[in-house]
Image (cartoon, grey):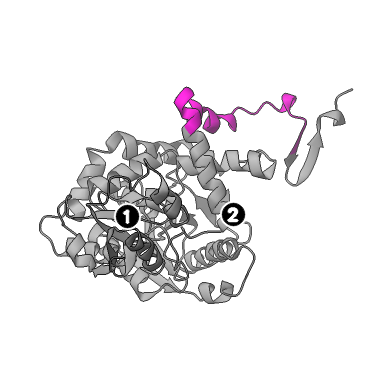
């Protein structure tokens, strides 16, 4: 059995491709959201079976120096031991992916080689004009999301979607076709210092003047056994509404995108037995005069990732301080179901390239004369109600 060595995050920021082979043992959802360059993904619970496969991910890796990492460098220790026992040369990344993210972001802030906020803004106007900017403005126009005199709280979680949304809103404000105000709102529900620092560093690099306020949500849901992430999300939404209203805002903006919409439609049908969608805007039911808007509604996630990677940006999928394992943050059942839906859509697209657009359009083309029953304002209507009239 070989000894497991450790490697510092600083050593892996600009290393040569052939120096190491990064092995990401987080779940596939977390890996797809963001990972180290040149990394391969083998989720921890699949590690041993993959090692035993003759044509598996490790079949030709005996000569490689493998760097194992998880989210915070906790579960990676056990994974490293498993590989070392099988004769691989193994290095464990100290502090995990989060530590590497922080070091990369810190270096980018002080590096003349990294793109400035102005460069990134120019990319939105030029390179990503059609796929990001035009789709952003189309959603705003099509769904009447921004009006003269609005004061909008742009809610930033620290992930790629909300950070891009903030940049798009800055660009919209720069055009100044009519007067409206923006507040870039970050809620700290009890982040670890490292997670909060990463959010603040990315905001600084992108030139986003964030307003941070603190709550004790994480502490409140810590001992909740059933669906703590669902409860956390509901509480976060309420606090965002409340703080935005306190700051004089009449709208909050969330960073949900096109893929979130179509996944929600299928999840409702396959797991909830209902046809519903994620609406582009909603009135706040418990906050009079407040409205929720989703200006990223027509933007594809693949384009958001392309923007992120082109600008060498790194974001954390979940900043929850309780996410100590290699799995993505979120309710386990909900998270795995959404990942199943992503894979299902991916498979369907192989034989039908229009499947995503058809799913999206399906909730715009509902024919009530062919529906057995539907609900409106909490009242159920059945086709037999007026069938004989």
Asked whether residue 151 appears in the rendered view, the answer is yes
- Foreground disc of the pair 1, 2: 1
Residue 98 at x, y percent in the picture: 33, 65
Which of marks 2 and 1 precedes in the sequence? Answer: 1
Q: Position of residue 297 (x, y in %)?
A: 46, 42
Q: How many marks?
A: 2
Indicate whether residue 370 is drawn in magenta: yes
According to the picture, the residue beneath numbered tag 2 turns out to be 333
Based on the picture, tell me whether residue 295 belongs to the magenta stretch: no
Q: Tell me which residue sits at (57%, 47%) in the image.
A: 337
Magenta stretch bounds: 347-374
Residue 313 coordinates in the image, percent (x, y): 26, 54
**Front-most of 345 and 232?**
345
**In the image, 349: left or right of 204?**
right
Is 52 positioned to the left or the right of 260 in the image?
left
Compute the Cα span from label 1 to label 2: 25 Å
Residue 149 in view here: no
In terms of secondary structure, where does tag 1 sit?
strand
- In the rendered image, which residue does mark 1 sit on? 23
Circle 1 residues within 10 Å: few <14, some 14–19, many ≥20: many
Q: Residue at x 57, y 52 (%)?
A: 334
- Please tell me how crowded label 2 is: few (under 14), some (14-19), or many (20+) other residues with Cα within 10 Å: few
């Amino acid at each position: 059995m070989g000894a497991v060595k450790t490697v510092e995050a600083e050593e892996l920021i600009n290393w040569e491709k052939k120096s190491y082979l990064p092995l990401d043992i987080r779940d596939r959802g977390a890996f797809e959201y963001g990972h180290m360059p040149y990394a391969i993904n083998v989720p921890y619970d699949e590690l041993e079976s993959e090692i035993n496969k003759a044509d598996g991910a490790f079949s030709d890796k005996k000569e490689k120096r493998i760097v194992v990492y998880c989210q915070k460098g906790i579960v990676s220790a056990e994974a490293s031991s498993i590989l070392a026992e099988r004769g691989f040369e193994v290095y464990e990344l100290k502090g995990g992916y989060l530590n590497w993210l922080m070091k990369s972001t810190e270096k980018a802030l002080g590096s003349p080689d990294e793109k400035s906020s102005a460069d990134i803004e120019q990319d939105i106007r030029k390179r990503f004009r059609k796929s990001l900017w035009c789709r952003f403005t189309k959603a705003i126009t099509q769904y009447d999301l921004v009006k003269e005199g609005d004061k909008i709280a742009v809610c930033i979680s620290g992930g790629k979607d909300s950070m891009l949304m903030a940049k798009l809103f800055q660009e919209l404000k720069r055009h100044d076709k009519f007067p409206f105000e923006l507040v870039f709102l970050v809620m700290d529900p009890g982040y670890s210092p490292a997670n909060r620092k990463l959010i603040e560093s990315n905001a600084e690099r992108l030139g986003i003047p964030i307003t941070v306020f603190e709550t004790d949500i994480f502490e409140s849901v810590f001992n909740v056994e059933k669906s703590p992430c669902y409860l956390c999300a509901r509480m976060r939404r309420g606090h965002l509404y409340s703080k935005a209203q306190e700051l004089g805002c009449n709208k909050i903006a969330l960073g949900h995108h096109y893929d979130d919409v179509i996944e929600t439609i299928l999840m409702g049908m396959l797991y909830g037995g209902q046809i519903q969608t994620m609406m582009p805007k909603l009135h706040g039911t418990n906050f009079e005069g407040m409205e929720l808007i989703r200006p990223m509604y027509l933007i594809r996630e693949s384009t958001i990732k392309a923007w992120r990677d082109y600008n060498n940006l790194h974001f954390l999928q979940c900043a929850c301080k309780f996410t100590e394992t290699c799995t993505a943050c979120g309710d386990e059942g909900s998270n795995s179901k959404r990942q199943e839906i992503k894979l299902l859509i991916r498979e369907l697209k192989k034989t039908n390239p229009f499947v995503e657009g058809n799913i999206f359009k399906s909730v715009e083309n509902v024919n009530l004369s062919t529906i057995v029953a539907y609900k409106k304002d909490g009242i159920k209507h059945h086709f037999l109600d007026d069938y004989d009239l």
